[in-house]
Structures are given as C-alpha cells and as structure tokens.
Amino acid sequence: DKALLEVYRGKDTVTADGVKVHLYGNIGNPEDAKQVAACDGEGVGLFRTEFLFMGASELPSEEEQFRAYKAAAETMEGREVIIRTLDVGGDKDIPYLGLEKEDNPFLGFRAVRYCLQNKDSYRVQLRALLRASAFGDIKIMVPLVTCVDEIRSVKALVKELMAELDAENIAYNKDIQVGAMIETPAASLIADLLAKEADFFSIGTNDLTQYTMAVDRGNAKVAYLYSSYNPAVLRSMKNIIEAANAAGIMVGMCGEAAADPLLIPLLISFGLGEFSVSATSVLATRGTIAKWSKAEADELAAKALSLATETEVAELLKANAR
Ligand code: PEP
Ligand code: MG
C-alpha cells in the first residue's frame, strides 16, 4: 500500500540489523532523474543512454549528450549518477547506425563490442561524459563486458580523452570511475579478474538470466526458463557479488531482479551493496530491505542455494515473503 510506504521516505536504506546499502533509480533520459529524486532515490544506478540515440535521427552531438548527462547529474544534486555507454544491438535497434542484420543479434555486434569498433562515436560519448563529470558525481558504466580487454580498452580511451581535455583546459573529474556491467556468464566466471580492472560492478540480471539460461528474453515459448530463481542464476549472482566484495569494489544490481521482494533477502545475504530499481519501486524496496536482518537473510539464502530447481526456489521464497 502506497501510503504505508511513505514511512520510508527520507530514511536510510538499512537492514533490520543496521547493514546500510545504496538504493538508486534507473532512468532512460534526464527528465526521469526528477522522478527518481521525487521518489526518494539516493542516486541513479543506471542511465540507459541508448534512448538519447533512439529518439534522434542521427548521432547526438557531443554538446547534446553533454547537456543530457549534465542535467541528470545536476538533478541528483551531487549524488551518484551511473551512466551506461551505448548499449546498441540485441533488442535495441538504432536505424541510422545502419547495422547489418544478424542471425543471432544477442550474440553479435552490440554494446561495447560495437563501441570499440566505432571509436569516433564512442569518443564523442566519453568526452561528453567526462565534461559532464565536472557538474556532479558521474560514473561511467560499460555494458555487456565479456573479457578484461574490453574494460582495459575503454579505460585507455578515457585516459586519451582526459589528456585531450587537459590540453583544451576543459574541466572533468580526474578520478571518474569506470565500471563493468556483469551480465554475461563469461563476465561472471571471471568476476575476480574483472574486479581488478573495473572500479565497480553492476549486475544486469535481465541479460545475465538470458545468457546464463540460453533463453531469448523476448521469446514467449521459452519464457518458463527465464527466471532469476534458477539455481544457475543464483550461483552466478553470488559469485559476482563475492568477487567484488573480496576485491573491495562496489557491487550493485540494476536488472529487474533488484526490485523483486522475494529475492531481496538473498541479495542482502550475498552482500549486494547497491540496488537500482525503477523510481516507483524505491520506497517498496527500502521497506523490504528494512524487514530482513543479515542473519535471517543468510539462513534463507543457505536454504535457497541447497535447492535443485527453480520451482523449489520460487516456493521457498514465496513462503518466506515479507
Ligand atoms: C540488464 O540486462 O539487466 C540491464 C539492466 O540492462 P538492459 O535491460 O537495458 O539490457
Ligand atoms: Mg543488459
């Protein structure tokens, strides 16, 4: 009930026994940041920039992008804003890029793969992000990472652009963080290696579930397999979170699973540090987190991880819903 949730407005996001986590909102354009702020989000955990590109008829200029990123940062008034670089391909088409039709678009030329092969337009976006970082707490997030080389390449490009901006006397945050979305089984399996290169992780459970289960996230015929309660997906999430915590980097989650009240105790138990959800789910998510202590969450997680099927996990989580 909406009115009951109002008691969580203005409060920290903490478990029943005082473990504090970050609770952010997902946005698709700078306007959405106002809604995140109005719904008491503590920052932005995912700005899906492809909507800036999809809503245009040609590549948005550095100036246009700069204005959009700066506006989001300013709306959040110094709070963290994690901006994901262009995640084109798969289910996200941008007609004017003229991408070739592929037999397996979800396994193809998309996201960071596309960006690193089209460095001129990637430079434009990264320069806009760097310039906007002078106006708030912006972090750069790289989608669909599958290997360490990709993070290294993006970081090298960011370094080059920093030198360029220095030469032009343009301000930016010299300590800007570059993080990796962990949303492929490859990234999950090498989470320990990626954690040495990336400044933070954010788990994209929408894609992580799709790729882990080898199930097209838009195909109704196999939708019964598309669930983050599958033991394979739970183990993957746990592995990612533990690797990040062992390396001392922040780990968040910006896929739909972060707002699932049934999963929240497991995420608390695994050690997730940041939840990024839709603006309208912020207060409800804070409310669910407040109902669990770490010890109770650990007990439920141990049971969940001992189960062999998605159905058993779902039943356990439903029986323990708060
Ligand atoms: C995800 O994959 O979980 C995610 C947050 O990104 P998108 O849904 O935009 O692919
Ligand atoms: Mg994704």
Image: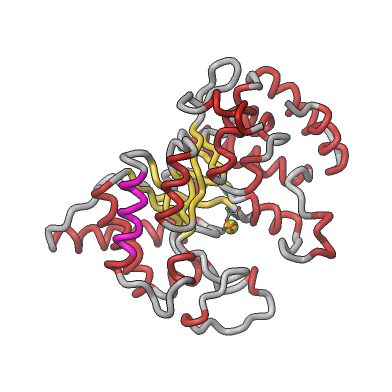
The foreground one among 20 and 281 is 281
- Left or right: residue 265 versus residue 220 is left
Of residues 209 and 190, the one nearer the viewer is: 209
Q: Quadrant of ligand 2?
A: bottom right
Q: Main secondary structure of the magenta part?
A: helix
Residue 68 lies in what quarter of the image?
bottom left
Q: Describe the colour scheme in one phrase.
A: secondary structure
- Residue at position x 68%, y 39% from top? 260
The spot of residue 100 in percent (x, y) is 57, 84
Q: Position of residue 239 (x, y in %)?
A: 63, 40
Q: Can the viewer see residue 189?
A: no
Q: Quadrant of residue 84?
A: bottom left
User: Is residue 303 visible from the viewing direction of this image?
Assistant: yes
Q: Which residues are magenta?
A: 65-75
- Quarter holding the N terminus is top right
Which residue sits at x=26%, y=62%? Answer: 161
Q: Nearer the viewer, residue 287 or 146?
A: 287
Given the current orientation, which residue lies at the most extreme top position?
17
Instruction: Give me the residue at 78% from left, 45% from top.
Output: 230
Image position of 198 with respect to 242: above or below: below
Left or right of residue 263: residue 284: left
Can residue 21 be found in the magenta stretch? no
- Looking at the image, residue 125 sits to the left or right of residue 134; the answer is right
User: Where residue 22 sits in the image (x, y, percent)?
Assistant: 49, 33
The residue located at (64%, 56%) in the rendering is 207
Above or below — where is 289 with respect to 201?
above
Establish if 320 lies above or below 160. above
In front here: 25 or 100? 25
Image x and y of residue 194, in percent: 50, 48
